[in-house]
Amino acid sequence: MEPKIEQIIDTFESRKKHMCIKGDEISIPDCNKATLPGTVTQRTCVFGGARIVLMPITDSIHLVHGPIGCASCTWDIRGSKSSRANLYKKGCSTDMGEKDIIFGGERKLFETIIELYKLYNPGAIFVYATCVSGVIGDDIKAVCKKSEEITGIRIVPVQSEGFQDYNKTKGHWIGCDALLDYVIGTKEPEKTTPYDINIVGEFNVAGDLWGIKPLFEEMGVNIISTITGDSYVDEIALAHRAKLNIVQCQKSSNYLADKMEKKYGIPSIKVNFFGIKQTINSLRDVADFFGDEEMMEKTEEIIKSGLNDVEHKIKEYKERLTGKTVALYVGGNKAWSLVRAFEEVGMDVILSGTKNGMKEDYERIKDTVRDGTVIVDDANSNELALLLKKYKPNLLISGAKEKYISLKLGIPFCDFNHDRISAFAGFNGFISFAKEVDASVSSPVFDLTSKKLEDLKNVS
């Protein structure tokens, strides 16, 4: 006998997590809880959180001071593309073993840094502490300082021991602190303009940045740095001279924007380039901030041109997608930022949830979705499968781990995680978004799969 949805709710509540329906009393879960060392967890650790913030800095070496297994965790997880250097793609580790754990790994770390400097002459070397190097007490700050004096390049310690008291959000903050303490403000720009900005929390996943950057350049806005997609460390060093920070991934980068406002007086605004309305609002917000009449006029011309192009190219996709339903089970920021984009192609979001969201993410989800939408926190594989069986969405948007659950149930799947290959940001990105969603939902294979599953169910 198939479990009822009430049983799923009981399961969530027994773990002090909640599945909520907007319109009823909402319990906001506390998702910023500790990841215990040595336990099996579906969440990534502090080290992983720091690394995915810093990894897209393309001219730098990212060195993991720990066992070789830690170096594979989150390597290239952002799927960040580069238009220039590719040093960031090299997986580097000190490969700590028993001898290093017994006698200490500082000498090995120092020798590894010097060797990497001689091999690649990188813009910087980011050194990540792991649980093992943290437990034995290696002083990576001292090693980095000594190495910097010898090499003359930035050697940045990242105190990202995975056993710290928070989940990967703490890692995001540690990565941002490393930039604030060792990179931002260490170099002055040759010239400035009244319209200098930083794009914060944009990691150029699948080339998303390349759908955003031309829009601002056409508006007359000067981008000092992108933190951290498709960036050079020297560009991030100039970020303190921007007049405005625009924050795309608000889960990982609000912290950095707030710190920069306190330290350098740089105001920030939150933007979202996933979806037409969100893209339009974001462009207008930036133009309104600067208050330049010519920029405002140019922005409206860009919007008009972008809208005409999008409406023409997505018409066919929208006709097929209108009335279809979608379930979102993604990163905290995407669980609410994608809702309007799906509505713009005619789809209804009937479920939205996340595994690693913060309290603010659930509040944003609640404010964004319609009454009756199911809001889920930290569902495991079995619970997600039960939810999909119950609500039967026409599409699941999630990451690689949930892909096969969806496909085995005969439900179309679309990857919106860091390893996707299609850019979805901006006007051109929205056309790609509509095309890919339609390709999944309208594929005839799922009709055949559903029929086959139904036949097997009848036989059994």
Image (cartoon, rainbow, N blue to C red):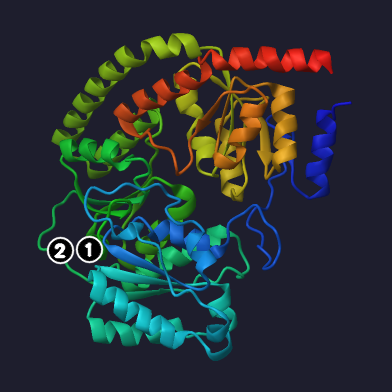
Q: Quadrant of the C terminus?
A: top right
* Residue 133 percent across, percent down from the top left: 53, 79
The vertical placement of 400 against 184, above or below, is above
Kind of residue indicated by mark 2: Pro
Task: Answer few, some or many: residues within 10 Å of disc 1's Cα (few below 14, many 20 plus, some between 14 and 19).
Answer: many
Task: Answer few, some or many: residues within 10 Å of disc 2's Cα (few below 14, many 20 plus, some between 14 and 19).
Answer: few
The vertical placement of 13 against 262, above or below, is above
* Residue 424 percent across, percent down from the top left: 38, 33
Frontmost residue, 396 versus 69: 69
Of labels 1 and 2, earlier in sequence is 2
Frontmost residue, 449 versus 148: 449
Numbered label attached to residue 413? none
Frontmost residue, 243 versus 211: 211
Q: Residue at x 79, y 17 (%)?
A: 457
| Residue picked out by circle 2 | 189
Numbered label attached to residue 238? 1
Kind of residue indicated by mark 1: Leu
The vertical placement of 242 against 272, above or below, is below
* Residue 268 percent across, percent down from the top left: 35, 51
